[in-house]
Amino acid sequence: MIFEPHAYQQFCIEYLKQHETAALFLDMGLGKTIITLTAIHDLMLDSFDVSRVLVVAPVRVAKDTWPKELEKWDHLRHLTIAVAVGTPKQREAAVRQDAMITVINRENLKWLVEFLHQNRMPFRYDMLVIDELSGFKSYKSQRFKIMRQLRAKVRRIVGLTGTPAPNGLMDLWSEIGLLDRGERLGRFISPYRERYFTASSYNPQTGIVYRYEPKPNAEQEIYDRISDISISMKALDYLDMPACVMNTVPVYLDDREHRVYERLKKEYILPMAEGGDVDAANAAALSGKLLQLAGGAVYDECHHVREFHSRKLDALEDLIEAANGQPVLVAYWYQHEHDRIHARFAKARVRDLRAEADISDWNAGKIPVALIHPAAAGHGLNLQEGGHILVWYSMIWNLELYQQTNGRLWRQGQTERVSIHHIVTADTMDEDVMEALRQKNMTQEKLMAAVRARVI
């Protein structure tokens, strides 16, 4: 295919060519991959500024999206690519290739460093591309520490993501720090916290802080400090996106069920007549137990499933019936939710979206009800051809996974109005999660707006 870039895409391409350190905060569907590949092409074959590029991406994106995008466009035919994903032998063969671009999944960064060292091979890459930069938001993770070492070996680096601050502005320190080596937000996390945040929730006896809030004017100062290396674009500004309707479907516990929920909430334990009790060791564990209970079932201490109600299953049945034969995609979080949905809708030909064949059948309209886990519904997965109705059976705290899952259906190429339903159990932690997602998104929207590029 012949690539005829939109104005915003050409703007981004030129930006990457002109900036040795760059962050592109682009919404899903705006073409982060083709933009970056075109910039790489020009840097390699026009200006000769780059010789080899290492792309680090989520495994599905590394395996499928980058090589397929390269094959798709005529102007990229002179670029060669090696995919270092799979068995050790497959990865070794890819790294030994004399390819212009090597793509590897982030879980194998440690293997790559060790392999090069053991074989006395140089780190030949002079440009790094981090696809989904938000995957490096934890500065304590091994992948972050390895990437920070690799950053020192390259002159050019690009960070790509549509969700730069999935859990708030604190995430930006590690992400921006990987790109500019601490130049803008500081080399260490503690001074960053002290300068821009204040403790809003903490244990007065131990001093352990549970939550930080930005200080007055801190948000704008952070945005200003990173604005010279980052640009942001929203799909709604540049693409003809389909309409998207967000809907909350409330369900209600009866008095007995609500008493059970409140007891677990207050006492951290539910004694069971037979077998293991349902208990929570700490507040984090309690949060998970309460979300499970809001969904109708919960694991006890022996990992047996204890069922309490079927309110969400009933609501899901109503939504599937209201779809009147149109395909429905259902997002779940816990395995027992997956199993209970399968059991309730056994006659409806419910099917998991896991393998490539499942995804192909979904997009061909052959699956009436499909189940997907948000952790497997991320980057590089296109499901917009198979349906336009998504139901959140479970509520999750992770804004990035939430937005990525929504983006499987609500994206360019979708021809129908997208309906996203959230089954929310009233007066439970479900409502807290919905509010938390809204607040996190507000922070992220502010960030995106602050560094948003205006293409004239």
Image (cartoon, rainbow, N blue to C red):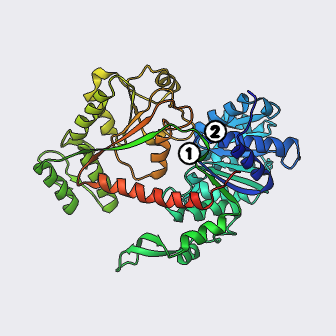
Coordinates of residue 295 in the picture (x, y in percent) = 26, 44
Q: Quadrant of residue 101?
A: top right
- Rendered residue at 58%/76% (across/down): 191
**Left or right for 137, reference 264:** right
Residue most extreme to the front:
456
Name above or below for residue 117 compared with residue 450: above
Coordinates of residue 146 in the picture (x, y in percent) = 65, 56
Density class for disc 2 (Cα within 10 Å; few <14, some 14-19, many ≥20) is: many
Q: Quadrant of the N terminus?
A: top right
Q: Amino acid at mark 2?
A: Ala
**Left or right for 189, reference 2:** left
Q: Using the rendered image of the protein, determine whether residue 118 is visible from the camera's viewpoint.
A: no
Coordinates of residue 449 in the picture (x, y in percent) = 57, 58
* Secondary structure under the numbered disc 2 in the rendered image: helix
Name above or below for residue 299 compared with residue 221: above
- Rendered residue at 32%/24% (across/down): 324
Coordinates of residue 287 in the picture (x, y in percent) = 31, 56
Q: Nearer the viewer, residue 426 or 273?
A: 426
Name above or below for residue 184 compared with residue 352: below
**Left or right for 106, reference 357:** right
* Secondary structure under the numbered disc 1 in the rendered image: helix
Q: Nearer the viewer, residue 75 or 336?
A: 75
Instruction: Say the numbered circle drawn on residue 62.
Output: 2
Q: CA distance from mark 1 to mark 2?
A: 27 Å
Density class for disc 1 (Cα within 10 Å; few <14, some 14-19, many ≥20) is: few
Q: Amino acid at mark 1?
A: Leu
- Rendered residue at 21%/40% (across/down): 311
Q: Earlier in the sequence, mark 1 or mark 2?
A: 2
Residue topped by disc 1: 236
Instruction: Say the numbered circle drawn on residue 386.
Output: none
Q: Using the rendered image of the protein, determine whether residue 448 is visible from the camera's viewpoint.
A: yes
